[in-house]
Image (cartoon, rainbow, N blue to C red):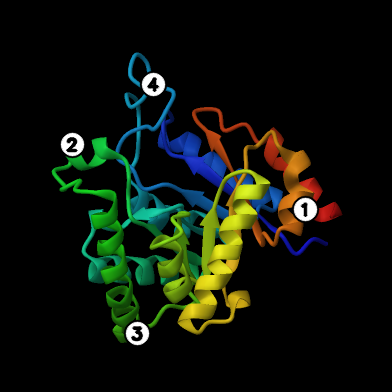
Amino acid sequence: MSDVRIAVQIHPQHADYADIRRAASEAEELGVDVLYNWDHFYPLYGGEPDATVGKHFECWTMLGAWAEATEKIRLGALVTCNSYRNPQLLADMARTVDVISGGRLILGIGSGWFEKDYDEYDYEFGTAIGRLHALDAAMPVIKDRLAQLDPQPTGSLPILIGGGGEKVTLRIVAQYADIWHGFGDIETYTHKSNVLDEWCTKVGRDPSAVERSVGVSPDKIELGDAYKAAGANEITIGINGPDYDMGAVKEWLAWRDGS
């Protein structure tokens, strides 16, 4: 049995909720380890004539529904946009979903990037570095509020931070995250992981305390062994609606169980 988790990100776009719920249930039945959605307000691709046109559902409301609809699979957002919610409210939302799920939530968070979300929902887009500084400021607030809530989270409620910026993002990961989610080819991913190790040392954490997750194209199963050798603890593939074809998911699960 492999020690690498297989995660599936169900893209909550271009589908009815019944399709999404079916996909979530099928992923759990197949033995997927982690189920993610994403935190956007519009589709990211696939719409006509504009990629951002089409059906779409909100992230955290959906996670609450998934917490009730599933029993074993871990779940979370890949990733929550820090800009969209007060950090203390987000901590309470995460704790609530964690309790509803029986302790299965992963609190995934990042600084945000999709300008249409900001413009259409009246958030200030600002600059990339400004959004990173806001994330940096929010992380201790989130952790402090989590420590105060009654009842406490049922599970360990690990924090996942996504992104690969070497000067700021990976330093935030080193300080606050239990899981880092990155992407890119093997060389890029390995380099970023090494930079994260350096940041962990600088901030006084054991690099092994931060697990490594990586997003991989569903059809690139031949890369599984290389990412595992590069230190990935979790491999995430994304699937799109409305059909949510699980063919590639089954192949990755077979790789996991045979590697």
Quadrant into which the C terminus falls: bottom right
Residue 72, can we see it? no
Quadrant of res 58: top left
Tag 4: amino acid = Gly
Q: Where does the image place residue 39, in percent across and percent down from the top left?
A: 36, 48
Q: Earlier in the sequence, mark 1 or mark 2?
A: 2
- At 46% across and 80% down in the image, what residue appears? 203
Seen from the viewer's position, the closer of residues 240 and 87 is 87
Q: CA distance from mark 3 to mark 4?
A: 42 Å
Tag 2: amino acid = Glu
Q: Earlier in the sequence, mark 3 or mark 4?
A: 4
- At 55% across and 28% down in the image, what residue appears? 243
Q: Where does the image place residue 180, in percent across and percent down from the top left?
A: 52, 62
Q: CA distance from mark 4 to mark 1?
A: 33 Å
Q: Do labels 1 and 2 touch, CB within 8 Å?
A: no
Which numbered circle lies on residue 256? Answer: 1
Q: Residues within 10 Å of mark 3 (few under 14, many from 20)?
A: few
Tell me the SS state at disc 1: helix
Quadrant into which the N terminus falls: bottom right
Q: Do labels 3 and 2 touch, CB within 8 Å?
A: no
Q: Which residue is mark 3?
A: 147
Tag 3: amino acid = Ala
Tell me the SS state at disc 2: helix
- At 20% across and 46% down in the image, what residue appears? 125
Tag 1: amino acid = Arg
